[in-house]
Image (spheres, grey):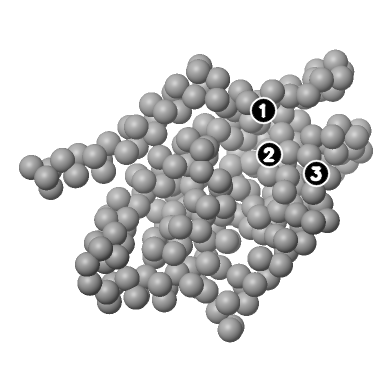
Amino acid sequence: MRRLLPLIVIALLAVTGALLLGDRLGFEALRENREALTGFRDTHYLAAAALFILAYVAIVAFSLPGATAATLTGGFLFGLFPGALFNVTAATLGAVAIFLAVRWGLGDRLAARMDASEGRARRLRAALQENAFSALLSVRLIPVVPFFVANLLPALVGMRLAPFAAATFLGIIPGGVVYTWVGAGLAEVFARGETPDLGIIFEPHVLGPLLGLAALSALPFVVKLIRRRG
């Protein structure tokens, strides 16, 4: 029960956040509070940066709604740089937090059972462990898998913390930079009374390079697979 306590807290906060916050952490909330946010940033820059990072970490760690709005806020308040650095760092820290909670609560025991078992489960864990970094890097580069799912699965198969954190940080940089860039241009969007194009990540000129990076990161896994079959 002691091991499951962090997971229970995360689950309760995630459900509570979904019910109470809903769309309150979305783009409209940023539009309505932009003057207060920029005013606080201008007078207390370091405090604003620290509070922003802490809030973003909490959003990711507890799977609260508003991660996209938080990324836009990072770009709006701090520009492309250091906004992208703040966004990527905070998202990585939040992912590490939930990864450790899941691994401590369930992952270690599940990994031990897979090691003790015979057949497919054991081979699956061995394959995931051997190619964990490149596999997770590919998943992070292409944002088609929900972020929290990509945090849970590596913990459940016993992936080590260092490659998880490295693959997460490196893998979310391209997408993080794109959305931070969108956030950095929100002042003009607000002035025109429009909403940002959040589907830009799937535009061919953006998605194409991301797919190329994902394929490149998966290349070691493919080469090993071909060698084994050969």
- Inter-mark Cα distance, 1 to 3: 16 Å
Amino acid on which disc 1 is placed: Leu
Left or right: where 172 falls relative to 120: right
Sort mark 1 into few (<14), some (14-19) or many (20+) by Cα contacts within 10 Å. Answer: few
Q: Which of 230/190 is in front?
A: 230
Amino acid on which disc 2 is placed: Thr
Circle nearer the viewer, 2 or 3: 3
Residue 37 seen anywhere in this rendered image of the structure: yes
| Whole-percent x, y for residue 43 in the image | 88, 39
Q: Residue at x 24, y 39 (%)?
A: 222
Amino acid on which disc 3 is placed: Asp
Which quarter of the rendered picture does the C terminus lie within? Answer: top left
Q: Which residue is mark 2?
A: 68
Compared with 91, 20 (above or below) is below
Residue 78 seen anywhere in this rendered image of the structure: no
Left or right: where 12 falls relative to 230: right
Q: Secondary structure at mark 2?
A: helix
As drawn, the residue found furthest toward the left would be 230
As drawn, the residue found furthest toward the front would be 120
Q: Which residue is mark 3?
A: 23
Compared with 113, 182 (above or below) is above
Sort mark 3 into few (<14), some (14-19) or many (20+) by Cα contacts within 10 Å. Answer: some
- Inter-mark Cα distance, 1 to 2: 9 Å
The image quarter containing residue 214 is: top left
> Is the C-beta separation of discs 2 and 3 under 8 Å?
no
> Is the C-beta separation of discs 1 and 2 under 8 Å?
yes
Q: Earlier in the sequence, mark 1 or mark 2?
A: 2
Compared with 121, 225 (above or below) is above
Sort mark 2 into few (<14), some (14-19) or many (20+) by Cα contacts within 10 Å. Answer: some
The image quarter containing residue 6 is: bottom right
| Whole-percent x, y for residue 119 in the image | 22, 67
Which quarter of the rendered picture does the N terminus lie within? Answer: bottom right
